[in-house]
Every structure is written in structure tokens, then in C-alpha cells.
Amino acid sequence: MVHAGRFRLIAALAAALLAMAAQAKEPAKPAAPTDAPIAYLYDVTNGATLYAKQADLPSAPASMATLMTIELVFKAIAEDRLKRDQTFRISEDAWRRGGAPSRSSTMFAKLNSDVQVSDLLRGVIVQSGNDAAITLAVGLAGSEQAFAGQMNQRARELGMTRSTFRNATGQPDPEQKMTARDIARLSAHLIEAYPDQYKIFAEPEFTWSKITQRNRNPLLADYQGADGLKTGFTEDSGYGLAGSVLRDGRRLIVVLNGLETAKDRAEQARKLLDWGFTAFEQRRLFEEKDVVAEARVFGGASLHVPLMAERPVDLLTPKGDDARVVARVSYEGPVSAPVAKGARIGVLRVWRGETLTIETPLVAAADVAVGDLPRRALDGALELVSGAVGKVADRL
């Protein structure tokens, strides 16, 4: 059963909203300008969605799908299941479907050559090489089909619930889809989980087989603080981009898809990022260790356990924005005793207008021991009654 924490949450949020209203002096500004059919702007530093336009619509990701291929390789290296200097052979299949004969993005790896994992990674990240992606997939899983299964499993583990993978390259497949929100979630994970390996994304060029190719990310050339991630293009997807920028201690991720030209992709990304860095003001909703809500405890020495966020919770709003702000806490409950301080119990979600801007876990702010026998018996009776009432209500 999902419960919602109410009194403490509403009291704290009301105070924050009153403070915001008192400071708002400018008229409301229009939403971020972008012509991209699909757009998503995420503030990694504050865990906030700044802009969303069809962000949950599954669409063809093109080479942005290789972000999941890269994640599985990074993970295997981090877990010492794969060495950077380990080599994989370029098979005829990888060469024909992703190499020079394919007339697609390629690393130009030679047929039957042995290439180190570190070079294959650069082939995928910098050159968008399909031959490199296929070779890594087969090297790790035995076949690209098996690797796609691992991609889907890992996507679910990372909370990417609306994305589906069918190959390691992002080449067209009617069933291969990703959402802009999932791409941003994956991008943030790559940055935070693999900081050393992530640096490859910022490399401006890579040379293989005496052919130098520039990094396809247009932001790296002239946008201050840009340090990754991937572009994509097929006839089905249009032009897309997942880009990350770190500026003055604040990191933004922009995801676009469905644009008509590479020029449009670069211009729209810069425009949305400019807006994200300049048009927002920050309001603190909860300090670290502030009690945000309470969760009902079953069989505990206390009826409730206080919940707090693991870090300060800040709401970013466009300057002068007057959109309604709504916050809710949800948890699976009642929570069974004992409860350890720091255990993850629920989730705080905050909407600005129709945009879900904050989604952050809540943890127990205190220990709750197992209650005595009378308390457990009373809780059991109450749960039995509430369950019976719920079943009657469902039938009605």
C-alpha cells in the first residue's frame, strides 16, 4: 500500500513557498525556447528537471544508445572483469556491418585485427564507430543479441523503465527506443559512477588506421564547461544529442532528439543550456536532516518514523515564475519494525506546474525499535481492519 506523508511536508513546504512568493518581483517569463520535438534539461547538481518536452516519449535513439553499451563496458572494467589492455578481434560481421564496407559511422578497424578495449572505447565514444561497438558487445557477451539482453537488464536496474535495446550500436530497429529522461538518467550515472573513465568523452579527436576523426559532440568545440557525451543520427531518429556541461560547480545535462540538421542540434542545445544556466533562481525547501514527513510503522515502539532527505533539497524555478508547486511523499507501508536510522523508506516528489522537477529518496531520521506485545497486537488488529475495509472498497 502506498502512503503519503502530509502534515510535516505541507507545513515545511508552505513556509518555503511563502518565502518564494515574498521574493518574487519580476513578471513570469515564457518557457525555455526550443524547436526540438523532444527536449529535456536536467540539473545534476540539484537533482532537478528544468525543462521537459515529450521527455517520456520512446523514440529512436541512434548512436545515443551506445551510452548503455559504454556503461556495461565501464562497469566490467570497474569490477575488474575486463582489462583496458585486453584485446578483442574485429570479426567479419563487425567489419561488414560496422566497418568500412558499411558506409556508417566507423572506427575503420581492420578485419581480423586485435584491438585493445581502451581503443575500442575511444572508437565508440569519440568516433561513434559501429565496428567498435559490435566488437565490444560480442567480446563481453558472446553475441550482440545476448549483449542487448544485458543492456535491457541493466537499464531496468538503473530505473530506465521506458527504454528498450535491440543492438549495441543504435542502428535502426523498430523496437529499439529510448526516452530523453532515460538518456539523461543514464548520462548522469556515467558521470557519477565512473568519473575517471568518463574523461574519454571530452577527448577532441582519435586516430585509428591513420585516420583522425573529430569528436562529433558540437558543444566540445566552443561551449564553456562542455565535457561529453554523445550525438546520434539516423533517418528514423533525426539529429539528437546528449550533452553535459559543468560550469561554476553546477552540472547540466541536455538531451534533444528529432531535429532536422546538425546545425539545428548544436544551436538548440546551446540555447537550452544558456537558459538553464541564467534563467533560474534557487530556493531551499529543506535543509539537510530536516524532517520532511512521517511514515507509519507497524509493530514499532513508535507509531511513526520521521523521514528526511539525504541532502538539502533545493527548488530551481525560472525567475519570476508563478507556476503552482506541489510536493508529495510516497512510501510502501506501513513500514515494519525495527527501522534503522538511514534506511531508505520513501520518495519526495516536487512538481512545478506539470513538470516533475525533484525526485529524491527519503531515509529514516531515527531508529524505531520493535514494540512490546500489546503494541504489536494492536497494530496487527488495525492492519487487519484496514485491509478488510480496503477490499470492500475495491469491490464497490
Image (tube, rainbow, N blue to C red):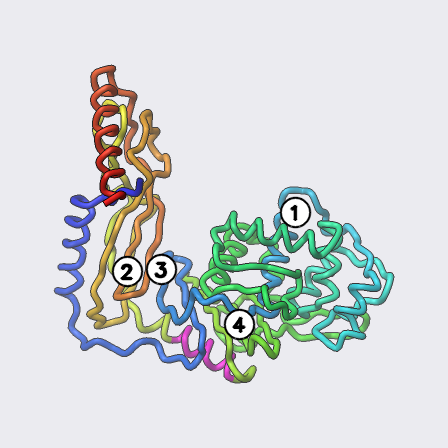
Type of amino acid at the residue the image marks with label 1:
Ala
> How far apart are the two marked residues, 4 and 3, measured between alpha carbons?
19 Å
Q: Which of marks 4 and 3 is nearer the N terminus?
A: 3
| Horizontal arrangement in the rendering, residue 86 relative to residue 277 (left or right) | right
Residue furthest to the top: 373
Horizontal relation, residue 96 to residue 327: left or right:
right
Residue 292 shows in this picture: no
**Amino acid under label 2?**
Trp
The x and y percentages for residue 202 are 59, 66
* Residue appearing at x 23%, y 19% in the figure: 377
Question: Quick one: quadrant of the N terminus?
Answer: top left
Q: Is mark 2 on a helix, strand or loop?
A: strand
Disc 3 on helix, strand or loop? strand
- Image spot of residue 51 (x, y percent): 36, 69
Residue 241 is marked as: 4
- Residue drawn at (12%, 64%), measured in percent from left and top? 22
Circle 1 or circle 2, nearest the eye? 2
Q: Residue 76 — which label?
A: 1
Report the amino acid beneath label 4: Leu
Residue 262, relative to residue 282: is it above or below?
below
Which residue in the structure is indicated by mark 3?
Answer: 48
Instruction: Pick out the residue farthest to the front.
Output: 396
Q: Residue at x 28, y 70 (%)?
A: 318
Measure the C-alpha gap from mark 1 to mark 2.
37 Å
Of the numbered discs 1 and 3, the one sitting upstream in the chain is 3
| CA neighbours of label 3 inside 10 A, class few (<14), some (14 to 19), many (20+) | many
Residue linked to disc 2:
351
Relative to 383, residue 49 above or below: below
- Separation of residues labelled 4 and 1 (CA atoms): 25 Å
Q: Which residue is drawn at 25% across and 71% down?
A: 319
- Judged left or right of residue 281, residue 266 is right
